[in-house]
Image (cartoon, rainbow, N blue to C red):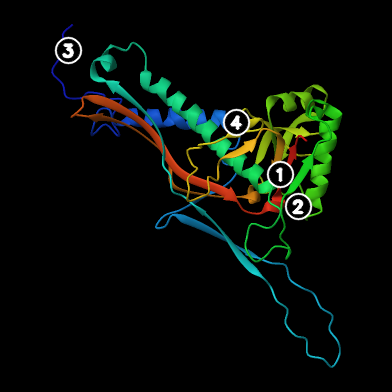
Amino acid sequence: MALESTTAFTRPGQVGGTGDIDALHIEEYTGVVESTIARKSALEGFVQRRSVRGTSIITNFAVGESTLQKLTPGTTPDGTVTKFGKNSVQVDTVILARNIFPLLETWQTSFDARQEVGQEHGKKIAKFNDQAFFIQALKTALLTAARHSGVDGAGHSGGSKITMAGSSDNLDPAKLYGYLADLFVQMEQKDVDPRTDDVIVAVKPAEFYTLLQNEQLINTQYKTSNGTSIEAMVLKTYGVPVVSSNNFPGGSNISGHLLSNSDNGNAYDGDFTKAVAVAFSPRALLAGETIPLTTSVFWDEKSKHWFVDAYESFAVGPNRAEFAGAIYKP
C-alpha cells in the first residue's frame, strides 16, 4: 500500500518534534559518558567541586581555635587572639578526550561507534579523575603542618602516616588491620572521627581482598554525615568504608601528569611506590572546576569529519591535612 502524502513525520532525534533531526544524538552520547563515569569511578561525587568562574583560583579560609580564660572578680578580662589563614588551588588546564571519524567510515560502520567511544571516554575520565584525587589525598596525608598558612598548631595540624615494619605486611590481614587501627588512632588524636567525618580508606585490589577473604570487611548500609545511605564494604569494628581501585596510585612513580605544570610545582607528580593505603575525608581536599564534564558531537564541514569530544577543567589540592592519613611500606 502506497504511503499517502503527509507532513506528520516522527523524528526521534528532534527535541520536542522540532529543530535539528539529530539534536538528541548528542544527548545520548552525553548520557553514555556520564553513566560510564558513575559506574567506573570510585570517588565520583565524594569530594565537592566548587565552581571557579571569573577567576582561576579557588580559596578556602581557616579559623584557628579559640582560647579559654578564667574570669577573675574585679578584673576586666582581656581579649584573646584567634589566628586566620587561607589555602588556594588554581584551575589552569583543560583535559580533553577526542575521536575523529572520517565521513565514509561513519556511514559504513555497522555498529554505534559513538556509544562505544563514549564508554571509552567515560572509563578514561573516571580513571583520570580518581587518580588525581587519590594523589592529592596521599600528598595531604604526608603534610607535616597545616596547609592553611598562619593556623598551624592553632587547632590545625599535619596529616598522619604509619610506616609498616615489614615490606609485605600489607598482605597479612591481621597486620594490615592493625596498621589501620594505628592510623585511626593518630587521626583521632587530631580530633578527627573516622566514622562521623566520612573517612574512607582506599587500597589496591590485593589489600582489599586480603581484608575481605579474612572477614575483616562486612557489607553494610553506610550513612554519610549528610544523611546519604550507600552500600559499602566496611571495616568490621571500625565502621569505615574501604574502596578497592586500580586508580589508587600505590606502587607507582608518576611523572608528567597532565595536570602538573611549573606553576603548581608539578603537584600531581610523585613517587608512590611504597604507598599501601590512604584514609581521607572530603574535608581533606579542596577541589574546584571551571568547566564541568562537557561532551559534544559535531560535524566539521571543512575537513569533512565528525568530532566526538569529552572535556573538563578542574583542580584538586590539600585542604585540611589532619583529615588524611596514609600507610606506607618501609
The residue indicated by pointer 4 is 247
Q: Residue at x 41, y 42 (%)?
A: 94
Which residue occupies the foreground of this view, 4 or 170? 170
The residue indicated by pointer 3 is 3
Can you tell which mark lies on residue 215? none
Badge 3: residue crowd in 10 Å (few <14, some 14–19, many ≥20): few
State left or right for residue 204 relative to residue 130. right
| Any part of residue 293 in sight | no
Vertical relation: 146 (above or below) 268: below
| Alpha carbon separation for disc pair 3 and 4 | 56 Å
Q: Amino acid at mark 4?
A: Asn
Callout 4 touching callout 2 (CB < 8 Å): no
Q: Residue at x 50, y 43 (%)?
A: 260
Q: Nearer the viewer, mark 3 or mark 2?
A: 2
Whichever of callouts 1 and 4 sits on the residue coming sooner in the sequence is 1
State left or right for residue 2 relative to residue 157. left
Which residue occupies the foreground of this view, 309 or 148? 148
| Alpha carbon separation for disc pair 1 and 2 | 9 Å
Element type at marker 3?
A: loop
The residue indicated by pointer 1 is 199
| Alpha carbon separation for disc pair 1 and 4 | 18 Å
Q: Amino acid at mark 2?
A: Val
The residue indicated by pointer 2 is 192
Q: Residue at x 78, y 24 (%)?
A: 210
Vertical relation: 79 (above or below) 165: below
Whichever of callouts 4 and 2 sits on the residue coming sooner in the sequence is 2
